[in-house]
Amino acid sequence: MDIDTLRILVDWKCNLSCSYCCNEQPQIREQIKPVSMKEINFTRYKVVCITGGEPLLFPLRVVAISQLARFSKAFVVLYTNGTFLNATMADMLMRAGVQAINVGLHEPKAFGQIIRKVVLATMGTGISVRFHVCNKYKSLHLEREFPSAVFKYWEMNACDRENEERVVLKDWEDKNYAPTGLSVITKEKR
Ligand code: SF4
């Protein structure tokens, strides 16, 4: 299968520690190549997925990647657990070119709170939002409580994606990337 998607982990760090996290599977982890921003050729991909860890722990990285990917005409999808997504953050993501957000729901007790918060935060941004839930929670019938939300159910341990290249950012320095409006100034000497 042709590789048309780049999945970028902005960092391994996450505020949650899900027992089934794909990043903890050795065979997945060893596929993830450390790269610096200047090594990435965004023009090679139709889709760029920004993920982590929790990417919104590092919003400047998300903004820089999204702007560069959009400049290369890639479709930009952010994967987040939704913890830090508020209206200000959603507005910033929209301005940076993020076109879709996939929100992983991990803590059943917090499902409703996260869904409400994300729906409210992204309202009016034009960003398409989808909630990703493990299929063991299908019985919660979240669609009944949130009929306007879009849900995708995933299977436990289904971490492989044949059409993706996976990388994790290395050598990131905030001082090299200073977003100004809709552009990113790269001060790094190449
Ligand atoms: S929220 Fe996502 S990245 Fe973080 S531990 Fe859970 S599955 Fe892994």
Image (tube, rainbow, N blue to C red):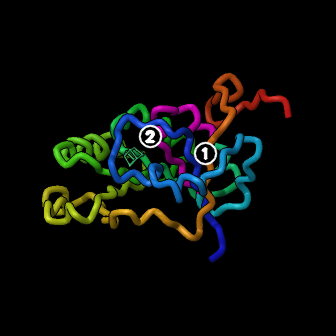
Decide whether residue 63 is among the magenta residues: yes
Query: Residue, x 20% and y 61% (percent of image)?
Result: 137
Say which quarter of the image contains residue 10: top right
Q: Earlier in the sequence, mark 2 or mark 1?
A: 2
Q: Is residue 72 above or below residue 82?
A: below
Q: Is residue 48 left or right of residue 51?
A: right
Query: Residue, x 67% and y 61% (percent of image)?
Result: 45
SS for tag 1? strand
Does the beta carbon at disc 2 come under 8 Å from ligand 1? yes
Which quadrant is home to the C terminus? top right
Q: Position of residue 78 (x, y in %)?
A: 48, 49
Say which quarter of the image contains residue 14: top left
Farthest residue to the right: give it: 190
| Residue type beneath disc 1 | Val
Which quadrant is home to the N terminus? bottom right
SS for tag 2? loop
Q: Is residue 141 left or right of residue 65?
A: left
Query: Residue, x 57% and y 54% (percent of image)?
Result: 7
Residue receiving disc 2: 54
Residue receiving disc 1: 168
Q: Position of residue 103 (x, y in %)?
A: 36, 50
Q: Is residue 159 above or below residue 98?
A: below
Q: Is residue 164 left or right of residue 89?
A: right
Farthest residue to the bottom: give it: 1
Decide whether residue 59 is among the magenta residues: yes
Q: Position of residue 41 (x, y in %)?
A: 75, 52
Q: Position of residue 39 (x, y in %)?
A: 76, 46
Q: Which residues are magenta?
A: 48-66
Foreground pick, 146 / 188: 188
Q: Is residue 37 left or right of residue 167?
A: right
Check whether the beta carbons of the residues at disc 2 and disc 1 lie within 8 A of each other: no
